[in-house]
Structure formats: C-alpha cells, structure tokens
Amino acid sequence: MQTTAVSHQPTAPSRRKEVWGWYLYDFGNSAYAAVVLLAVYSAYFQGTVVGGAEGSRLWGISVGIAMLVVAIISPILGSIADFSGSKKRFLLLFTTIACVFTGTLFFVQAGDVVLGMVLFIMAEIGYRASQVYYNGLLPEIAKPAEMGRISGNGWAIGSAGGIVCLLIVLPLIVVIGGGFIVRVSLLITAVFFALSALPLFLWVRERAQPQPLPPGSNIITIGFQRLWQTVKKARHYREFIKFMIAFLIFNDGIIMALDFAAIIGTVLFGMEQQGLIIFIIIVQITSVAGAYVFGITTDRWSGKQALIISLLLMIAAVVWLFFATSQTIFFVIGALAGFALTGVQSVSRTMVGKLSPPGQSAEFYGLFAVAGRTSSFIGPTLYGIFAAEIALLYAAEGKTAVTAEQLGQRAAILTIAVFLIVGLLLLLWVNEKRGIEAAHGGLEIGD
C-alpha cells in the first residue's frame, strides 16, 4: 500500500533561536571532525596504536566500514523519520552514539588495534548518520532563498567549533604531552560535542507532522515502502540523480583528503602532534572563510557555479601537495584546501535541499547519504590499501621502511586528484535551474 508524503507547515522565515540552535550543533559536530578525524585520533591510531604503512591500511578500512553501514541504514531510517516526523529523535540517537563512543576512545592504547577500530567505527557511524537528520532540518528552518547563506554560516560556525576545541586540547598536549593526554583530548571532544548539540534539541521545532500508519503496516515496512517510492520519484528528478552521481565521485576525494590529512602530515613531513593540531587550526580558520564566501556565492550566483570554483581550488591544492617537500608549503596547501573543501561540502548540502521536493527532505538527504557514504567507503579504503601496497613494493626493492611508506603516501595522493577531476567533469552536465523547477512544482526533468 502506498503512503502519502509527510505534510509540513508552510516554511516560515528562519527564527533566530532555531537557526542558532542548528548552527551550534555544527559547532560541536565539527569538533569531532577536527579532533578525531583530522588532528589527533587518526594520527594516533596510524602511528601509535598500529604503526607503519599497515596503520594507513587499517585506518582506511575502519572509515570504509563505518561509511558502508551508514549507507545501508540511512535511506530506510530517513524515510521513517520523514513519515513519523521524528528527525530530531533519530538525530538524538545517533548524536548520543557519536558522543559516547568518542569518549570511549580514551581507553585505546598502543597495540589495541581491534578495540581502536571497533570504537572508532561506532563513533563514526553515529557522527555520519546524525548528519542525515541534521541536514534534513535545513529546509524546515530556512526559506529556499536563504539556504545557501544559512548552510554556509553553519559550516563557518562549525569550523569555528573545531578551532575552539583544538585550542582547548593544544595547550594540554604541548605542556604535558604523552599518549595519556592525547586520549584525554578525546574525552574533552565528546563532552564538547554533547554540550554544543543540546541547544538544537531544546530550540529547534520539527515541522513535519506524523502520519497515521495504514492498516496492516508497521513503521519498518513503511520505511521500505517510502524508500522505494523515493527511489521511483528520484528517477523523475533527473538533475538530482545527475548531481548525486557527480557528488558520489568528487565527495570521495574530499573525504580521502580529510581522513588522511594528519597521516600525510606525519609520514611525508614528519609533523608531531602539536604541529598537526596547529595545521588543522589553520585549515579550520580558512574553512570559516570558505563556508561564508561560498554560501554567499551560492545565493547570488548558483550552487553549481560555486561548486565548480571550489572543486577547481581543491584540485589545485591536491596537485600542489603531490609535489610539496616542506612543512611550510604543507601549511599553505592546508589553508587553500580548507577554504575549498568547506565550499564543496556546504554547497553540496544546499544543492540537495534545493533539488529535493518539499516534505521529503530527510528521504532525499538519505539518498544523499547513500551517495556520500558509499563513495566514502570506496575512497578511504582504496587510499589506505594503495598507500600500503605501494610501500610494500618499494620495500621489496630495498628502500628503507620510512622511505617506502613516504613513497606510498605520495603516490596515493594522486588518487584524490582523480576522484575530484572526474566528479567535476560529471558536475558540468547538471542543469541546476531545471532541477529546482522539477523539485518545486515545475516541469519534470525530461518533459
């Protein structure tokens, strides 16, 4: 039996308190990304928990497993959330998972490879899955004309949250140092994330209205039914599908760059934990600027134009990184990449909101999550395996372990560029204007 779409009250002008509650969630969410993925835990896991090229391989596999799980569960749960008007409930569930398991990373020490992988995978599932419902609230708090600006501001304020959290843990690592303080920083991040997320649950009102279950149905079957309906509907929104295909590819490059930034800094440029944190702070600062600039660009020009510019900048940064040989240049490249990659992520989120039919945001963001998480499963796994295998080849030729690992990392950087370039080429085929018309009651794409 088919079900009707979740009804919504008319979108009202954004309420300042609701918007700030939404912003503050990103403030905490980005602290997780800055500490766990970028500056601290990734390098700690690769260098201390595992060690050597095998650390890169297992880190890529861990990220890939988490992404695959989210890709499987997000569409179903997104459909259920839209039908039952419960995006905030699912957001609370996965935020709790992210915060709890981030805190438990404190217990991971040198040699605890399986424990380090399992706890991180659980934290990453919570972090990634929560974004489906967080993103799904954007069309409920913002008018279409505001989405670019509010999404960009969210990324900017989120990046600031990453900076604040890093500035809290940096003095501890510099003054005290040692693996214990590195682990304590993960506890601090969990608390920071939880406290920053709280205003959203107190201030943001979910406007989706729960729908009664049809006879003979339950919430699970409704989830599958609505997922199938969403897939069938999405086929009529051709520009949305084209954008999803492009996003699946270029997002891979973005996730690979983010997940391996600290490892690249450690292996290729010999950076210590303090240097990595300073590097990520610089990246986060330029991310604030990038989110703000590309948010304005999206509203004044178009999402597609903003994405093209940000992708070109990101490709330039990656190619430059391949040839870089000094820490100073690495810092400059990080600043450029921070400005560009936040633009890619922020504008992509806005594009989904614009290309999604009203009342079905969580469902379409669920498909967005499938594209993002499926590609994210492929990319980091491929990067980690590629870097490790190339290192083994050079080691077999007589290179030292350190040199072989460095050569493996440098070769793997090229895989990032490939994904970004192919994704950009596919994006050129997307007709944003027609996609928006189709989503908001105009002619269907293909008519």
Image: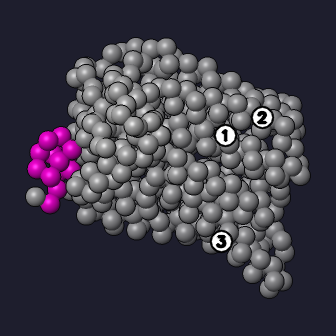
Q: Earlier in the sequence, mark 3 or mark 2?
A: 2
Under circle 3, the secondary element is helix
Q: Earlier in the sequence, mark 2 or mark 1?
A: 2
Query: What amino acid type is highlighted by mark number 3?
Result: Phe
Q: How far is the residue under mark 3 from the one under mark 1?
A: 25 Å
Query: What amino acid type is highlighted by mark number 1?
Result: Ala
Q: Position of residue 255 (x, y in %)?
A: 54, 53
Question: Quick one: label 2, few (<14), some, or many (20+) residues within 10 Å?
Answer: some
Q: Position of residue 288 (x, y in %)?
A: 47, 35
Which labelled disc corresponds to residue 104? 2
Question: Quick one: label 3, few (<14), some, or many (20+) residues within 10 Å?
Answer: many
Locate the C terminus and report the quarter of the image it occupies: bottom left
Q: Nearer the viewer, residue 338 or 245?
A: 245
Is residue 265 on the magenta stretch?
A: no
Q: Earlier in the sequence, mark 3 or mark 1?
A: 1
Question: Quick one: label 1, few (<14), some, or many (20+) residues within 10 Å?
Answer: many
Is 407 located above or below residue 133 in the figure? below
Q: Which residue is mark 3?
A: 386
Under circle 1, the secondary element is helix
Q: How far is the residue under mark 2 from the one under mark 1?
A: 9 Å
Give me the residue at 81% from left, 35% from top. Answer: 106
Q: How far is the residue under mark 3 from the one under mark 2?
A: 30 Å
Left or right, residue 348 beside residue 198 = left
Magenta region: which residues?
Answer: 433-446
Under circle 2, the secondary element is helix
Which labelled disc corresponds to residue 123? 1
Give me the residue at 77% from left, 38% from top. Answer: 105
Quarter assignment of residue 122 = top right
Q: Nearer the viewer, residue 151 or 269?
A: 151
Give me the residue at 75% from left, 50% from top. Answer: 117
